[in-house]
Image (cartoon, rainbow, N blue to C red):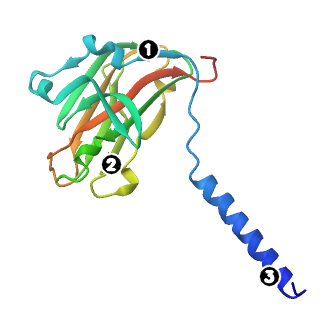
Amino acid sequence: MSKNLRPILLLCAMTAASSLLLLSCSEEKPKQAGGKVVYEFLAEAKTAEIAPYHRERVNFGQEFTINKEKRPILFEHPNAEVQFNGVAIPQNAVLQFGMGINPDVWDKPGDGVTFEITVVDEKSAKTMIFSGYIDPKASTGDRKWVDHEVDLKDFAGQKVSFLFSTTPGPRGNTEYDWAGWSKPQIRLQGQGR
């Protein structure tokens, strides 16, 4: 190998290594609390409140498999809302959940789903703590479980209600909006399992 070519190859190798490092950092999943589970929403299905006009749009006990990962879900076809009351929020608590749309309908009409979570505190004040939109029919980047974690420090020491709701996408199209919240639960940060 010529002496003139070595520096160029070395520079190319360093650039490639740097690019791979940056790519792996940018795709790194957010760190999630791995502490003790203190409340599992799916296990409390019997106590959940569902408005009579939403009952046919809500189902507990289903599972979705997305990218070979099967998860239990709270199924909510828009427009739907499920309320869980009297949930005690300890110090250092976070809400963890995933959201997804059944892969069986990714090739069907529709414009995605908006997922929202609202907390109603002891003074009946409503605070939206999460809003997210996915459309795996149009965006291949949404063809996965989309996981989130929300800090609940503002509600620590209270008993609150959680409202899980779904609405259609921006065009208001509810066709094949087979939406699911995967494994919603409250965990403690920084404590053993």
Mark 1, Cα crowd under 10 Å, few <14 / some 14-19 / many 20+, is: some
Circle 3: residue type: Ile
**Is 12 on the left-hand or right-hand side of 124?**
right
Q: Do the CB atoms of the residues marked 3 and 1 lie less than 8 Å apart?
A: no
- Identify the image quadrant of the C terminus: top right
- Above-or-below relation of 49 to 111: above
Q: Amino acid at mark 2?
A: Ile
Q: Quadrant of residue 177?
A: top left
Q: CA distance from mark 3 to mark 1?
A: 62 Å
- The amino acid beneath tag 1 is Gln
Residue 123 or residue 110, whichever sits in front: 110
* Residue 158's disc number: 1
C-alpha separation, residue under disc 3 versus residue under disc 2: 44 Å
N-term mark: 3 or 2: 3
- The spot of residue 123 in percent (x, y) is 34, 18
In this rendering, position of residue 44 left or right of residue 153 = left
In percent of the image, x 45 and y 38: which residue is there?
A: 147
- Which residue is painted at 33% across and 57% down in the image? 139
Residue drawn at the location 22% of the way across and 39% of the way down: 178
For numbered disc 1, what is the local secondary structure?
Answer: loop
**Residue plotted at (59% across, 48% down):** 28
- The residue where tag 2 is placed is 134
Q: Nearer the viewer, residue 28 or 39?
A: 28
Q: Return the disc, 3 or 1, that comes first in the chain's sequence.
A: 3
Residue 95 shows in the view? yes
Rendered image quadrant of residue 176: top left
Left or right: 127, with 155 as reference point: left
User: Which residue is tagged 3?
Assistant: 8
